[in-house]
Image (cartoon, rainbow, N blue to C red):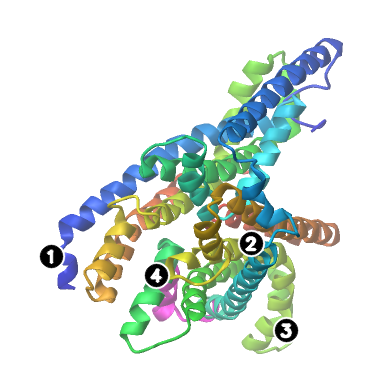
């Protein structure tokens, strides 16, 4: 933060003021934290019986609780990985058909993309779980969740892929075409491989979104982490403790993925200045659309 | 499609309720997010830590868990209230982290030369902030902020799924589950309800973006 554009390099007086401000703010924050802790303690939220199923290996419920949550975490990851894989394939196909489509039917693809982008992902999931069975498509709950997530995320990925391809210098396409490559070859052998490199950070960020969105599986009773946490809470009556543990699990995994995205972006920007600058803009505009 | 026509008033009520949640969420997260954004660029280290911790926690945690925490955690520590307000609180806590990041990246996108030039001509901190940096930062903040707000409108459906009575999602859930109506038309109606908000919102954002776009 030393290079913040808002301030000059501080002189002795403003350094003193900053120091005083830091102490005041620090005390205020500690006081607020202490108040929260005190409130929690007053309500008996630090009682060992609420925590021990999670943190005490000798507790009789400890193995069962962690078995349940491990299984649920695997279910969450399965749904996220499947949804991401399908979204990647369908999203790429959507983007390619949007790019190569003749004008007279391109609007159909644009329409589908805009429609699916405009509805909440939770509606897409609920839709899949309620409507598909009425058309005789009886699947395990996992697949309704995957279908719902894929419907929503494939159009987001389609936009990321399109932005990635558009961010490449025009010379790439021109050079490939002048070598006599067919249109499909230009896309498959020249543009897409480069675009995927550029898009990698945005795709990882989207994986974080998908991972978070799998928690919506609780609406259709898919046994993922949040749903299982609910079941545990019904038995142990410790919502704060259980949700805290689940939240920490999510935050650790997602934070690691976000850092990975930042790291890859940094690596890429060292390699190719001009390309990754544009990709960064593409990523920037996508970063805001983070879902649930 | 008769279901939609028969229950049209219900859908309109749901739409209004959704808009109400979004209005509270919009104001709340904008205020909180801007404060946090200011924290993140402030020279006072503890405030920066609070901002960073907030963003790390709420950006990486599913909204579902945030809402569960508000709905079931807060009553445990003696904070009671309407479900509606728990839902709005959760939405504000979650969205403010994204608003904060948009604000911060906007401020950081102003080139340092601008601030240096402002100081060089003798403007003080308040003047350079209000007449040089902010006018430029706001322009870069608008596109990502708009996306965040549209995402928030869609996320309000999750608040509805928690049984904040009568919003669009709850209307759909009620008609499809409780009354056993055919799910396809009922949920198509719900989806249309959201599209009525999100698509014009997206178009408006596009216009706004072109209007404030600056070559840099």
Would residue B211 be visible to someone looking at this image?
no
The image position of residue B29, as x and y in percent, is: 50, 38
Foreground of the two, B62 or A234: A234
- Residue that numbered label 2 is attached to: A208
Identify the element where label 1 is drawn: helix
Query: Is residue B38 placed above or below A150 in the rendered structure?
Result: above
Magenta highlight: main SS: helix
Q: Is residue A241 left or right of residue B179?
A: right
Identify the element where label 4 is drawn: helix
Mark-to-mark CA distance, 3 and 4 = 39 Å
Query: Is residue A244 placed above or below B75 in the rendered structure?
Result: below
Q: Which residues are magenta?
A: A99-113
Foreground of the two, B137 or A205: A205
- Residue that numbered label 4 is attached to: A126
- Residue that numbered label 1 is attached to: B6
Mark-to-mark CA distance, 3 and 1 = 54 Å
Q: Is residue B1 magenta?
A: no
Would residue A109 be visible to someone looking at this image?
yes
Q: Label 3 lies in what chain? A: A
The image position of residue A13, as x and y in percent, is: 82, 10
- Say whether disc 3 or disc 4 marks the residue closer to the N-terminus: 4
Identify the element where label 2 is drawn: helix
Q: Are marks 3 and 2 on the same chain?
A: yes
Q: Nearer the viewer, mark 3 or mark 2?
A: 2
Mark-to-mark CA distance, 4 and 2 = 21 Å
- Residue that numbered label 3 is attached to: A189
Mark-to-mark CA distance, 4 and 1 = 22 Å
Q: Kindly give the residue lying farthest to the left in the view shown.
A: B6
The number of numbered badges drawn on the structure is: 4
Answer few, some or many: residues within 10 Å of disc 2's Cα (few below 14, many 20 plus, some between 14 and 19). Answer: many
Query: Is residue A287 placed above or below A150 in the rendered structure?
Result: above
Q: Are marks 4 and 2 on the same chain?
A: yes
């Amino acid at each position: 933060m030393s290079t913040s554009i808002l301030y000059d390099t501080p002189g002795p007086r403003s350094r003193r003021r900053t120091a005083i401000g830091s102490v005041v703010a620090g005390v205020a924050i500690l006081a607020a934290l202490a108040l929260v802790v005190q409130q929690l303690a007053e309500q008996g939220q630090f009682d060992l019986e609420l925590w021990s199923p999670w943190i005490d290996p000798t507790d009789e419920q400890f193995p069962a609780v962690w078995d349940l949550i491990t299984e649920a975490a695997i279910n969450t990851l399965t749904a996220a990985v499947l949804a991401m894989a399908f979204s990647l394939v369908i999203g790429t196909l959507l983007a390619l058909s949007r790019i190569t489509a003749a004008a007279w039917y391109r609007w159909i693809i644009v329409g589908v993309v805009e429609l699916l982008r405009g509805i909440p992902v939770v509606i897409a999931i609920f839709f899949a779980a309620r409507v598909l069975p009425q058309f005789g498509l009886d699947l395990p709950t996992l697949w309704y969740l995957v279908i719902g997530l894929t419907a929503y995320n494939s159009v987001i990925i389609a936009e990321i892929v399109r932005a990635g391809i558009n961010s490449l210098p025009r010379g790439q396409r021109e050079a490939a075409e002048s070598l006599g490559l067919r249109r499909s070859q230009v896309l498959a052998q020249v543009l897409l491989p480069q675009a995927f490199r550029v898009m990698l950070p945005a795709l990882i960020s989207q994986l974080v979104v998908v991972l978070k969105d799998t928690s919506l599986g609780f609406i259709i009773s898919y046994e993922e982490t949040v749903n299982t946490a609910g079941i545990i809470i019904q038995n142990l009556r410790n919502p704060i403790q259980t949700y805290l543990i689940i939240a920490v699990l999510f935050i650790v995994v997602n934070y690691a993925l976000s850092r990975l995205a930042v790291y890859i972006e940094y690596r890429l920007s060292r390699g190719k200045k001009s390309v990754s600058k544009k990709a960064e803009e593409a990523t920037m505009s996508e970063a805001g659309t983070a879902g649930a | 499609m008769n279901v939609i026509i028969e229950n049209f008033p219900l859908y309109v009520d749901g739409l209004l309720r959704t808009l109400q949640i979004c209005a509270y969420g919009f104001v709340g997260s904008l205020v909180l997010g801007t404060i946090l954004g200011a924290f993140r660029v402030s020279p006072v280290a503890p405030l920066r830590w609070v901002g960073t911790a907030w963003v790390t926690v709420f950006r990486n945690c599913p909204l579902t868990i945030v809402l569960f925490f508000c709905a079931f955690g807060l009553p445990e520590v003696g904070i009671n209230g309407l479900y509606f307000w728990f839902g709005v609180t959760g939405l504000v806590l979650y969205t403010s982290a994204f608003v904060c990041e948009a604000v911060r990246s906007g401020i950081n996108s102003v080139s340092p030369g601008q601030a240096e030039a402002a100081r060089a001509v003798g403007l003080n901190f308040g003047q350079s902030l209000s007449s040089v940096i902010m006018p430029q930062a706001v322009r870069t903040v608008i596109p990502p902020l708009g996306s965040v707000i549209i995402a928030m409108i869609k996320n309000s459906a999750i608040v509805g799924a928690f049984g904040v009575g009568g919003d669009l999602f709850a209307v759909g859930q009620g008609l499809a589950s409780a009354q056993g109506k055919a799910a396809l038309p009922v949920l198509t109606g719900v989806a249309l309800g959201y599209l009525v908000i999100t698509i014009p919102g997206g178009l408006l954002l596009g216009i706004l973006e072109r209007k404030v776009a600056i070559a840099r």
